[in-house]
Image (spheres, rainbow, N blue to C red):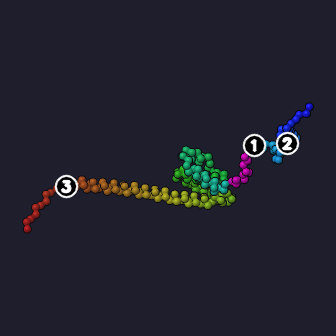
Amino acid sequence: MPIELNRPHAASALVLLALAAGCASQVPAPPLVAARPPEPARTPVAPPVAARPAPAPADAVLAYADRVRTLPAPELAAEIQRFGDTPPSATQALQLAIALLQAGDSTQQPRVQLQLQRVLAQQDAEAQALQPLARLLAAQLADRRKADELADRQARDLREARRRNDALNERLEALRAIERSVPTTPAAPRAPR
């Protein structure tokens, strides 16, 4: 027995059938972008660092002087002992001279002068790079020696002036004692005029 459908219901049924048929026959569209596998986590890589050249001998000596300048006396003495009497290189000889100068012991000035002369006498490239600095330190050492001699001379002069002052004070006191021991005579009355 055929089913009778009125026209509006038949049209609706046809539309539903067409939609259902269209949905079932559609194949999913391929993705437009190909799926990539997840990238592994990247660790930041530092750019390659060019090997730094060794510091120039003068730079090394100046950095050493800056470091030694703040050392307390016991550490400075240990630093001087570390060098021994004859440093093997011009840089170390100059560093020893700087450490000795920093110690401030005037009895070590001949040792400082010896180290500076050792650097000035060498002809290798390292020593020649340090010779201007060695000449500067030698000039400062000579100035310090002159200042020490002047201070010693002034101290001697001051001691001598104090000794003379004490001798003059003793003479003055002796004169005052004599003056006190002399009897005072009353002043003679003035004659009327």
Question: Pointer 3: residues within 10 angstroms few (<14), some, or many (20+)?
Answer: few
Give the x, y percent position of residue 107: 53, 52
Residue position marked by numbered label 1 in the rendering: 41
SS label for mark 2: loop
Q: Residue at x 65, y 56 (%)?
A: 57
Residue 19 at least partly seen: no
Q: Which residues are magenta?
A: 42-54
Residue 125 percent location from the top left of the image:
69, 59
The structure residue drawn at horizontal position 54% and vertical position 57%, both measured from the top left corner, is 141
Residue at the spot of label 2? 28
Disc 1, SS: loop
Nearest-to-viewer mark from 1 and 2: 2
Q: Is residue 62 left or right of residue 166?
A: right
Relative to 53, is 3 on the left or the right? right
Would you identify the image quadrant in which residue 176 lies? bottom left
In the rendered structure, are the residues bearing label 3 and label 1 in contact, judged by CB atoms less than 8 Å apart?
Answer: no
Crowd band around label 2 with a 10 angstrom C-alpha radius: few (<14), some (14–19), many (20+): few
Residue 45 drawn in magenta: yes
Q: Residue furthest top?
A: 1
- Looking at the image, the residue that sits furthest to the right is 1
Residue 73 or residue 30, whichever sits in front: 30
Q: Which residue is mark 3?
A: 182
The amino acid type found where label 3 is placed reads Val
Q: Is residue 5 above or below residue 169?
A: above
